[in-house]
Image (cartoon, grey):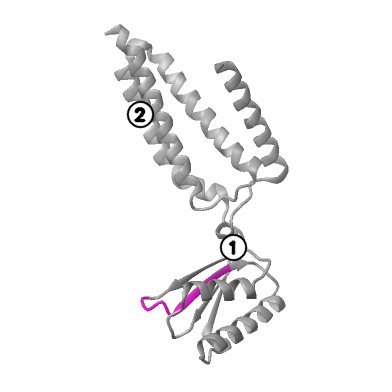
Amino acid sequence: MKKTVLIILICLILAGTIMVCLKGFNVGLPYRENINISVYVGKKIEDKDMKAITNEVFKGKSTMVQKVELFEDMISIQTEEMSEEELNEKKEILINKLNEKYEVEIKDDDIEIVHNPKVRLSTIAQRYVLPFGITTIAIVIYQMIRFRKLGVLKILLTTIISLGIISLTYLSLIAITRIPINKLTIPVGMLIYVTVIIILNMKYEEKLEPNK
């Protein structure tokens, strides 16, 4: 059973590696080249209206929209990068929609547009390498001391290999399924990391019982 599971995981990792080499990861909108459009409406904006207008104006494009400011009278729309001509067209439609819906007089100058560059995944990962590295070293040292009767080298290899295989499997599944990498990707990975550590410690405790 263990061998079967291991073979499946290795196959997933190989498939994921091939997918990354061929297509890379599917990066979510916040990490791609994108445009941030901020509009001060001057009236409280309803969520459903905000989403409906955004979907209508930027139909067929990935978008993220949220209200900003204390009085919820300003919206921020994040969407895919586009040509200047298309952007001006979308901006004009957006202004007309908002003016019609909220009976205001939004002008071209009232809209702030920021072009955001692509964020490299390596840049995101770098922020977590040191904390994860230190945490892993501390955990392994604790396990080697706590479960030394099971064999220091065995504990070291089991923990490192288990964490490595699970981490690579997680990344491979993301690559194969084409799930966009977004702000939840790393927190979910951290949750998996903690779960693996807990399961390993429970198994070590079970094996340690007969030796007491």
Q: Position of residue 147 (x, y in %)?
A: 33, 16
Q: Residues within 10 Å of mark 1 (few under 14, many from 20)?
A: few
Closer to the camera in the image, 123 or 71: 71
- Asked if the magenta segment contains residue 206, the reply would be no
**Whole-number angstrom distance, CA of label 2 to CA of label 1:** 37 Å
Q: Position of residue 103 (x, y in %)?
A: 51, 91
User: Closer to us: mark 2 or mark 1?
Assistant: 2
Q: Position of residue 176 (x, y in %)?
A: 65, 40
Mark 2 sits on what residue? Answer: 139
> Which quarter shows the N terminus?
top right
Compared to residue 29, the image places residue 52 above or below, namely: below
**Pointer 2 and pointer 1: residues touching (CB < 8 Å)?**
no
- The amino acid sitting under disc 2 is Ile
Q: Position of residue 104 (x, y in %)?
A: 51, 91
What residue do we see at 59% from left, 59% from top? 29
- The amino acid sitting under disc 1 is Pro
Mark 1 sits on what residue? Answer: 117
What residue do we see at 60% from left, 38% from top? 173
Residue at the extreme front of the image, as rendered: 48
Marked residue nearer the N-terminal end (2 or 1): 1
Image: magenta residue range: 70-78
Compared to residue 176, the image places residue 202 above or below, namely: above
> Residue 71 sits in which quadrant?
bottom left
Which structural element holds mark 1?
A: loop
